[in-house]
Image (tube, rainbow, N blue to C red):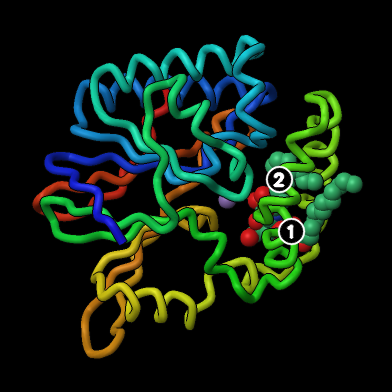
């Protein structure tokens, strides 16, 4: 696996789930991008930046909320390197989006060569192996033939399907036990063993934390990124992780 060389202070954030119905979260994200451009050496966004990404062609007729996000990403990439990773909501993000905003696409998973050492970064949904219904859905939508067929549909058709899928997902997750929606311990252990890294960062589960574990006689840390919600959550929430030579640190979003 090729490593991405990232010296300096690296900021990592995921799970903003941006869309037309969450203007306050979009605004918080725009503020965060501005701060990243001023304070970080690079920004990594490993997935679920968007509530539902139905294909890169939407940027050719971007609605106002999306146009603001794209412009803000462009301003950020003019200052620092920005890497976009795919999540379970925006797995259809591709080269056209990356090129338009001047960002790079993260491999899955990504190996980061930082001042703190080598770190593995991934969205995290692929580690939720106990959630069999989700893994079946994931295999379907990650199939290139399925994606080609989906992307061949009109934008209004795709929007309707995405809305239906979000509705079904909300109902399904409410009915699931919280435990099965967390990462599977064996999958995490296998990832640590296979890659040899001491540090893993992921999002998706919306359970920000730092877990310390022993795998193959070596101390490992699993850092989990928070999700963002400045529209419906009380108090509003969100945050990011900073990596520098001294280590990793989670920060809460300061919402005015
Ligand atoms: O996203 P979240 O946090 O609610 O839950 C996820 C898993 N759900 C998903 C599904 C996405 O939310 C759907 C939106 C994707 C938009 C992308 C573009 C358009 C694709 C259109 C697809 C037709 O990822 C959820 C996990 C949870 O994380 C925790 O890990 O449990 O998994 C599910 O809910 C899967 C269900 O258990 C089974 C499948 C339900 C969806 C069925 C879609 C049917 C399509 C409707 C059209 C007829
Ligand atoms: Mn996710």
The image shows residue 189, relative to residue 159, as above or below, that is below
Residue 202 appears anywhere in the view: no
| Residue 217 picture quarter | bottom left
Residue 31 relative to residue 170: left or right = left
Q: Position of residue 121 (x, y in %)?
A: 36, 56
Q: Residue at x 40, y 41 (%)?
A: 13
Count the marks. Answer: 2
Q: Position of residue 160 (x, y in %)?
A: 85, 32
Q: Position of residue 248 (x, y in %)?
A: 22, 53
Q: Position of residue 150 (x, y in %)?
A: 77, 40
Residue 118 relative to residue 126: left or right = left
| Residue 219 picture quarter | bottom left
Give the CA separation, mark 1 to mark 2: 9 Å
Q: Residue at x 24, y 54 (%)?
A: 3
Residue 141 relative to residue 246: left or right = right
Looking at this view, is 204 or 234 the one in front?
A: 204
Q: Which residue is tagged 1?
A: 140
Looking at this view, is 151 or 177 the one in front?
A: 151
The image shows residue 243, relative to residue 218, as above or below, that is above
Q: Answer yes or no: do the residues labelled 1 and 2 have beta carbons within 8 Å?
A: no
| Residue 132 picture quarter | bottom right
Which secondary structure, mark 1? helix
Q: Residue at x 73, y 35 (%)?
A: 151
The image shows residue 81, relative to residue 207, as above or below, that is above
- Residue 147 got which mark? 2
Q: Residue at x 40, y 45 (%)?
A: 106
């Amino acid at each position: 696996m090729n490593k991405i060389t990232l010296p300096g202070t690296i900021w990592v954030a995921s799970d903003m789930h941006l869309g037309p119905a969450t203007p306050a979260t979009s605004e918080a994200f725009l503020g965060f991008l501005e701060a990243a451009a001023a304070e970080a050496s690079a920004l990594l966004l490993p997935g679920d930046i968007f509530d539902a990404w139905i294909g890169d062609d939407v940027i050719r007729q971007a609605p106002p909320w999306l146009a603001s996000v794209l412009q803000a990403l462009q301003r950020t990439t003019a200052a620092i390197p920005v890497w976009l990773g795919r999540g379970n909501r925006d797995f259809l993000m591709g080269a056209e989006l990356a090129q338009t905003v001047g960002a790079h696409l993260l491999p899955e998973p990504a190996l980061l060569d930082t001042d703190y050492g080598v770190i593995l970064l991934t969205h995290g949904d692929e580690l939720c192996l106990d959630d069999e219904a989700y893994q079946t859905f994931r295999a379907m939508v990650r199939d290139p033939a399925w994606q080609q067929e989906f992307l061949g549909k009109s934008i209004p058709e795709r929007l309707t399907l995405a809305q239906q899928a979000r509705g079904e997902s909300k109902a399904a997750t409410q009915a699931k036990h919280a435990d099965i929606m967390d990462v599977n311990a064996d999958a995490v252990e296998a990832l640590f063993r296979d890659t040899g890294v001491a540090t893993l960062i992921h999002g998706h589960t919306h359970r920000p934390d730092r877990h310390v574990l022993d795998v193959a006689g070596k101390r490992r840390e699993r850092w989990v990124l928070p999700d963002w919600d400045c529209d419906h959550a009380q108090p509003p929430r969100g945050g990011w992780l900073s990596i520098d030579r001294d280590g990793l640190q989670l920060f809460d979003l300061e919402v005015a």
